[in-house]
Amino acid sequence: MHARHPGVDARSPIFALALAVAFVPVLGAVEPAHAAARSCIVSEAKAVWDAGASDVEAGGAVAAADGILTFTDGTGVVEPVGPTGSISFDGTLVYTSAAGVKTTLSAPTIVIDGTRGTLLFDVQPEGTDLVPQAPLADVDLGAAAVSESGDALNLDGVGAATDPTGQGRDVLWSGMLGGIDLTIAADCATAEASTGPSAVPAPADAEKDAGGTGILVPVIVVGVAALLAALLAVGSVQRRKRNSARAAQPEQVHDPLP
């Protein structure tokens, strides 16, 4: 008795499955485009801080008058969602701290994180090493208003309360900290979609390749499905032919032995 040879009907599902598995890397290689986060470049920033700094010498883009510090010409990047970002100013402040030490503050920075903000400075008490970007005061931005119009972003925080941090109590002047008025104008732009999880714009050639691959995917899927259907049909026809051939053969009658 001969073992039954697997015909096309037995092999076709296996063959089609192998083709489908072979195309899985091609399908998996296509990643959906990810839109980059909307970023805004600060075009104008100003902060007026009622800092109670009566004996402070200001320089650069910082002015001091009657205990009020004015920071102008700020630069930085702000994200509308949150909002988050940081604004940097040029300028210096020289004063005698509450501890009686002559101190220089420079590189003032305002960090924005939702409804909270932080004032940071490079700090250098006389006779010591510089401490970069030390957080000296917290800012309450809960009442700040953020508005967008086209590619323009505006943030206005009027009278935002400020409180010294633990480090600020040791470093800042002895005056009482008051509110700060923060005004920011920024130009926003949406980066082009990329083919990966990062927000880096894809080169033109990469975009063309991604588009071509995207068109190729449905063609491959349809082709595999059509091939599977054709192989199954061929197997069914051959199976019917074999069944018909077996039915047409006369049955062999074995005579009993004499």
Image (cartoon, rainbow, N blue to C red):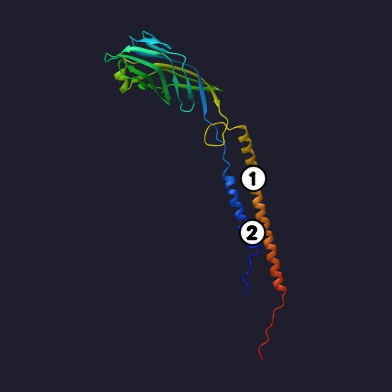
Residue at 63 percent of width and 48 percent of height: 221
Q: Which mark is nearer the camera, 1 or 2?
A: 2
Q: Residues within 10 Å of mark 2 (few under 14, many from 20)?
A: many
Residue at 63 percent of width and 34 percent of height: 205
* Type of amino acid under label 1: Pro
Q: Is residue 231 above or below residue 188?
A: below
Q: Quadrant of residue 115?
A: top left
Looking at the picture, how far across and down is residue 214, in whole percent? 62, 41
Tell which circle, 1 or 2, labels the residue nearer the N-terminal end.
Answer: 2
Q: Is residue 54 left or right of residue 1?
A: left
- Badge 1 is on which residue? 218
Q: Are marks 1 and 2 in contact (CB under 8 Å)?
A: no
Of residues 143 and 47, the one nearer the viewer is 47
In three-dimensional space, the C-alpha distance between marks 1 and 2, rounded to whole angstroms, equals: 22 Å
Residue at 60 percent of width and 49 percent of height: 23
* Type of amino acid under label 2: Ser
Of residues 139 and 93, the one nearer the viewer is 93
- Badge 2 is on which residue? 12
Instruction: Report the residue that reaches farthest toward the left.
Output: 99
Residue at 54 percent of width and 23 percent of height: 188
